[in-house]
Amino acid sequence: MTAGRAGAFGRVAGAYAAYRPSYPAELFAGVEELAGRELRGARVADVGAGTGLATAPLHARGARVVGVEPAAPMAAEFRRGLPGVPVVLGSGDQLPLADGAFDFVTYAQAWHWTDPRRSVPEALRVLRPGGALAVWWNGTDRSVPWAAEQDARLRRLFGAPAAPPDARSRFHALPGGLDFRHRQVGWRRTVPLDTHLACLATQSSFVVLGESATAAFLAGERRRLEGLFPGGTVEEPYVVSLAVAVR
């Protein structure tokens, strides 16, 4: 992660906690099935935990979770939202955790910020034999036309290359040498239009872009979406791409 984008996450920590989507129950059932063990009672290191959007459902499922987060403002939001769950400052490239102490190492929306040459050995170091590395990403379901069109506008705004329509493209960047098993889970979230736009604004690229350009883009999105969702409620379509490798 560049220094600018790393700092950007700290500046939107409160909004990130308030507006970003969490994950469906089917995702965690998939983690258990692909890992061959339950989360209940398991020791889990949730790396790049942010404000705890994945940590909270892991904890609710009965896992004994420790959050690992590099940005102090995000860790502060984590502590406010999950006061009973420990969180430590650190990164996946240098985990501040003991050898062989965990049944799962999880990355929700965070693996792509690591250097796999360092993060893979670190994950294997802290996993017990038979433990599992689980990584996943929430992505826009581009099979839904309005969402695909919005995604294309975002990519043009930020100068990103056109993404392949298949959400499995996330798997292409996974490191070799580990036997990853894959699954995808489609789900929807229904939120007020204001929440949808505020969620978009938590993307680190918008924080780096600046307030004026961000406001102009979001105003255009509001006009488009008010026509599509006259009731003021947006159904956001997602696909979670999950990959699990057992040590």
Image: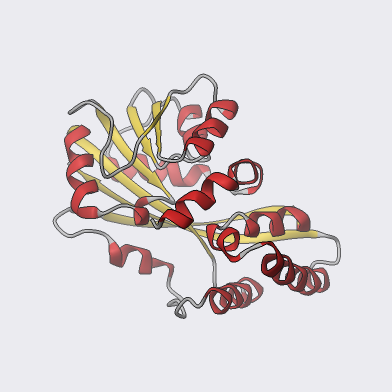
- Residue 215, quarter of picture: bottom right
Q: Residue at x 17, y 44 (%)?
A: 121
Where residue 131 sits in the image (x, y, percent)?
22, 35
In the rendered view, tell whether residue 89 sits above or below residue 152.
above
* Whether residue 22 can be seen here: no
Point out residue 2 in the picture as x, y percentages from the top left corner.
40, 58
Tell how many labels.
0
Instruction: Tell me which corner region of the image, top left, top right, bottom left or bottom right, holds residue 221.
Output: bottom right
Q: Nearer the viewer, residue 93 or 66?
A: 93
Q: Is residue 244 visible?
A: yes
Q: Is residue 21 left or right of residue 92?
A: right
> Is 23 displayed left or right of 183 in the figure?
right
Q: Say above or below: 108 vs 219.
A: above
Residue at the image position 77 percent from the left and 58 percent from the top: 193
Quadrant including the N terminus: bottom left
**Residue 223, horizontal then vertical, whole percent:** 81, 72
The answer to which image quadrant residue 35 occupies is top left
Q: How is the image coloured?
A: secondary structure
Question: On screen, 50 above or below 115?
Answer: above
In this rendered view, identify the residue nearer to me: 173 or 26.
173
The residue lying at 47 percent from left, 23 percent from top is: 85
Residue positioned 24% across, 47% down in the render: 119
Horizontal side of residue 82 vs 189, given as left or right:
left
Q: Position of residue 149 (x, y in %)?
A: 62, 78
The extreme top residue here reads 84
**Image quarter in which the C terminus is found:** top left
